[in-house]
Image (tube, helix red, strand yellow):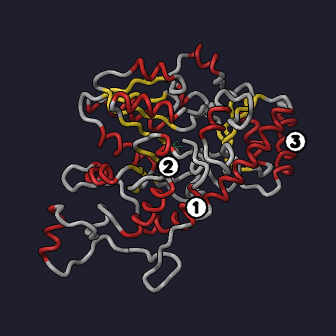
Amino acid sequence: MRNKKGTPANKIQDLQFFGEFGGVNPSIADSSTFTYLAGKTMGDVFEGTREGCYLYSRHTNPSTSYLGQAIASMEYMNGAILSASGMGAITTTLLQLCSTGDEIISSRTIYGGTYAFMKNYLPKFNIKTTFVNTTKLAQIEAAITKNTKVIYCETMSNPLLEVSDINAIAQVAKKHGIKLVVDNTFTPMIFSPAKMGADMVIHSLTKFINGTSDTVGGVVCSDEEFIGEMIDVNSGSAMLLGPVMDSMRAASILKNIRTLHLRMKKHSENAMYLAIAFQKDGLRVIYPGLKNHPQHEMMKNSMNDGFGFGGMLVIDTKNKEKANELMEEMQNNNLGYLAVSLGFYKTLFSAPGLSTSSEIPEEEREEMGISDGLVRISIGLDNDIERTYNTMVDCMKKVGIL
Ligand SMILES: *Cc1c(COP(=O)(O)O)cnc(C)c1O
């Protein structure tokens, strides 16, 4: 449900972690293994009859635990497990939830790596995925079979920035006893999927949460029981496949997450400014903060207050050549970088093309408005967005889009 009172920003602010010598940041646990005073205690930990001891850092480590507590708390969940990449979190979660013969219903416009994993890799284990348009509840319901274990979607999709109605999807999932897994990478703090009924919430930390494009990382948040299953010494996908995050990285991401609320506000404020301005100029602009976005009202009614509609913006340059020309021109004018990824302090742009939308038939892609000329822009933290706008307009005029 809409989260008006407490905000995820308070959850981060209220974290109080001390370092070993009273440091204002927790000490980094720079160790792969941990000593025991008694041999019996170690045996008990292995047998699972004793908890709360660190044993080996592929299982748990104090530094990754601090970051896990922080993100779980921000997501209103009880547990979290960190991984070395977003894909590490996604793949281990799905492999923990699904066994041979099980089925997944997924949004067809998900992140390219997730799509490839479901389409090309999971069939090796006889796990089948049905791809649907998750903004259409009827399509999800129609795809449910007795073997469906997971419904998977992203809060905001690529490249059309479609917003899934997590509240409604969660009701369908609950009714059928299916787990709902939500990738919240595009909208940290903006959406709290667990409050809307998601069972697992995943982030690629590589993007907004870390915000400095200096590392890859991932997390899955859920209840303590599921997180416990994932790190079970005998059967846990995270423990046995081992995509563990390093303690140094966990410590650096924990410092960056302290400024996430400010960054999200600024990303959103800048994106909104540009979306309104370019729409006024006559460009086709996709941004969920605009009234003509198909899920604008639904998003407004289900998101948290105070963080805006996100930092992602898409403009249509009509064809691939123009898209490339514009991106090169913008990079030459130091407006940002022609690079994949998102959530960086500087603006990043890339042409999503058709790569992540290959499941969608050509004619429907056209109808949906997925063209070769789309440029996806992750708007940076520019202090003077009017100056940025003016330079962008110059670039657009130069390549003949405006
Ligand atoms: C980047 C991304 C991922 C994958 O994360 P990595 O950290 O690159 O492994 C997953 N989902 C979404 C929505 C992403 O943007």
Label 3 element class:
helix
Is 16 situated above or below 397?
below
Residue nearest the viewer, comparing 399 with 7: 7
Q: Which residue is mark 1?
A: 10
- Alpha carbon distance from label 1 to label 2: 21 Å
* Residue 385 spot, x, y in % from top left: 81, 51
Give the position of the C terminus as an image quadrant.
top right
Q: Which residue is mark 3?
A: 394
Label 1 element class:
helix
Q: How many marks?
A: 3
* Residue 76 spot, x, y in % from top left: 47, 53
In terms of sequence position, does the residue under pointer 2 or pointer 3 come before the other?
A: 2
Disc 2 versus disc 3: nearer the observer:
2
In terms of sequence position, does the residue under pointer 1 or pointer 3 come before the other?
A: 1
Q: Residues at badges 2 and 3 in contact (C-beta under 8 Å)?
A: no
* Residue 354 spot, x, y in % from top left: 58, 27
Q: Which residue is mark 2?
A: 204
Residue 366 location, quadrant: top right
Q: Would you say 386 lies left or right of 33 here?
A: right
Q: Is mark 2 within 8 Å of ligand 1?
A: yes
* Residue 133 spot, x, y in % from top left: 51, 24
Q: Which residue type carries mark 3?
A: Asp
Is the residue marked by circle 1 packed among few (<14), some (14-19), or many (20+) residues within 10 Å? few
Q: Which residue type carries mark 2?
A: Ser
Q: Would you say 36 lies left or right of 257 here?
A: left
Q: Residues at badges 1 and 3 in contact (C-beta under 8 Å)?
A: no
Q: Would you say 36 lies left or right of 161 here?
A: left
Is the residue marked by circle 2 packed among few (<14), some (14-19), or many (20+) residues within 10 Å? many
Outermost bottom residue: 21
**Residue sitting at x 79%, y 44%:** 273
Q: Which residue type carries mark 1?
A: Asn
- Alpha carbon distance from label 1 to label 3: 41 Å
